[in-house]
């Protein structure tokens, strides 16, 4: 079967070839009624764009990259949903890369995205070294940080105040009478884990406790299984009065281990998570957590990225910082 051309689509829709091109490449610039007519013609005729050819002509593709630390974490799944929704609305596809917290894997993923000539990259970086991201920018690929603050004025970023979140979480535990607190965290090479620990120490200092008494238990991964193992270590020693976990997956693992060992939550140990994933409210003992605007992180970051791509002369770089919200449930009552 012969391939349908843009000219044939244009004739079928009663518009110019340039309008069809705009619908394919810059849909936001076409009136909704016209865009619907062109999209109907594309569907009726079975038109398929020649992606490689259009990429060569434009110097870039209609794709963006998303690199996250752990796609198995529902937090990043929800971020990705926000990214994909905006990208789809504006005629872009998303290539997902999962670094698993590895700098080497992240670098390989970024190299692949560059080879695919993506229009831009959204990234939650695994480390603080900006050289990899600078290289992308030198190749004309826009970069926006997701769930990570920017440290330069010419860089867009959308993040959540993790110091404030850690402080609010532990302040809540202390307000319930706890005076000994354990912090179960993923690798302290991850910025979010470090900043949530700093916030926890600030909360202890604020009520006259020694912040160095915060019992820090570091895990290699931020999974429920890692939380179970960390809880087993706590149970074998002196149990703290409260446990703050760096994410909800760790907290759910801790909860399971505590209940299996006959430790009552919150009567014996109060428990606090972070992220407020869907499973938090549905657990055996509903989990108190720090809620983040996860979906909005993905949406807004994508809007900033594509504005920078499409309007480089007028684009204004923004550093957007959200505040997390305390959600108190049974595990701290």
Image (cartoon, rainbow, N blue to C red):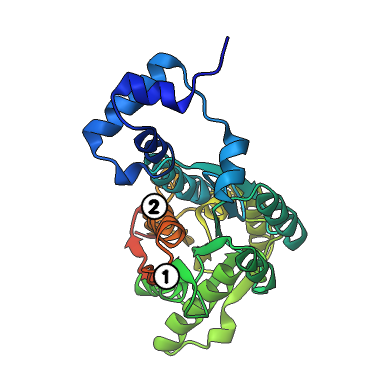
Find the distance from the CA under tag 2 to the CA under tag 1. Answer: 21 Å
Pinpoint residue 72: horizontal percent, then vertical percent: 59, 44
Residue shown at 37% from the left, 71% from the top: 316
Q: Residue furthest top?
A: 1
Pinpoint residue 136: horizontal percent, then vertical percent: 64, 64
Q: In this view, does 4 lie above or below 213?
A: above
Residue 165 numbered tag: 1
Pinpoint residue 276: horizontal percent, then vertical percent: 41, 53
User: Could you tell me which secondary element the residue under label 1 belongs to?
Assistant: helix
Residue shown at 50% from the left, 81% from the top: 201
Residue 239 in sight here: no
User: Could you tell me which secondary element the residue under label 2 belongs to?
Assistant: helix
Q: Which of 195 and 233 is in front in this view?
A: 195
Residue shown at 44% from the left, 42% from the top: 25
Q: Are marks 2 and 1 in contact (CB under 8 Å)?
A: no
Q: Nearer the viewer, residue 267 or 129?
A: 129
**Label 2: few (<14), some or many (≥20) within 10 Å?**
many
Please state if 232 lies on the left or on the right of 167 as rendered: right
Pinpoint residue 273: horizontal percent, then vertical percent: 47, 58
Indicate the quadrant where residue 114 lies. Answer: bottom right
Q: Mark 2 points at which residue?
A: 299
Q: Earlier in the sequence, mark 2 or mark 1?
A: 1
Q: In this view, does 269 lie above or below 224?
A: below
**Label 1: few (<14), some or many (≥20) within 10 Å?**
many
Residue shown at 59% from the left, 63% from the top: 140
């Amino acid at each position: 079967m012969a391939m349908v051309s843009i000219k044939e689509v244009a004739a079928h829709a009663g518009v110019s070839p340039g309008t069809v091109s705009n619908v394919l490449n810059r849909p936001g610039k076409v009136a909704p009624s016209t865009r619907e007519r062109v999209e109907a013609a594309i569907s009726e005729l079975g038109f398929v764009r020649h992606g490689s050819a259009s990429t060569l002509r434009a110097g870039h593709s209609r794709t963006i990259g998303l690199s996250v630390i752990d796609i198995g974490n529902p937090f990043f799944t929800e971020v990705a949903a926000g990214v994909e929704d905006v990208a789809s609305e504006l005629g872009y596809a998303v290539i997902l890369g999962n670094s698993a917290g590895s700098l080497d894997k992240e670098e390989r993923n970024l190299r692949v995205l560059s080879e695919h000539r993506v229009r831009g990259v959204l990234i939650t970086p695994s480390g603080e070294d900006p050289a990899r991201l600078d290289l992308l920018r030198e190749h004309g690929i826009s970069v926006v940080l997701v769930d990570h603050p920017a440290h330069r004025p010419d860089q867009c970023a959308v993040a959540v105040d993790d110091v404030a979140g850690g402080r609010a979480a532990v302040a809540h535990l202390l307000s319930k009478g706890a005076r000994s607190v354990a912090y179960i965290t993923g690798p302290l090479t991850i910025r979010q884990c470090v900043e949530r620990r700093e916030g926890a120490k600030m909360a202890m200092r604020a009520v006259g406790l020694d912040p160095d008494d915060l019992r820090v238990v570091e895990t290699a991964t931020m999974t429920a299984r890692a939380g179970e193992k960390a809880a087993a270590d706590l149970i074998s020693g002196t149990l703290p009065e409260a446990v703050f976990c760096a994410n909800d997956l760790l907290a759910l693992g801790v909860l399971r281990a505590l209940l299996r060992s006959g430790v009552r939550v919150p009567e014996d140990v109060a428990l606090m998570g972070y992220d407020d994933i869907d499973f938090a409210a549905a657990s055996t003992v509903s989990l108190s957590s720090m809620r983040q605007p996860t979906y909005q992180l993905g949406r807004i970051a994508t809007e900033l990225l594509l504005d920078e791509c499409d309007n480089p002369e007028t684009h204004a770089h923004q550093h957007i910082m959200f505040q997390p919200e305390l959600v108190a449930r049974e595990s701290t009552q």
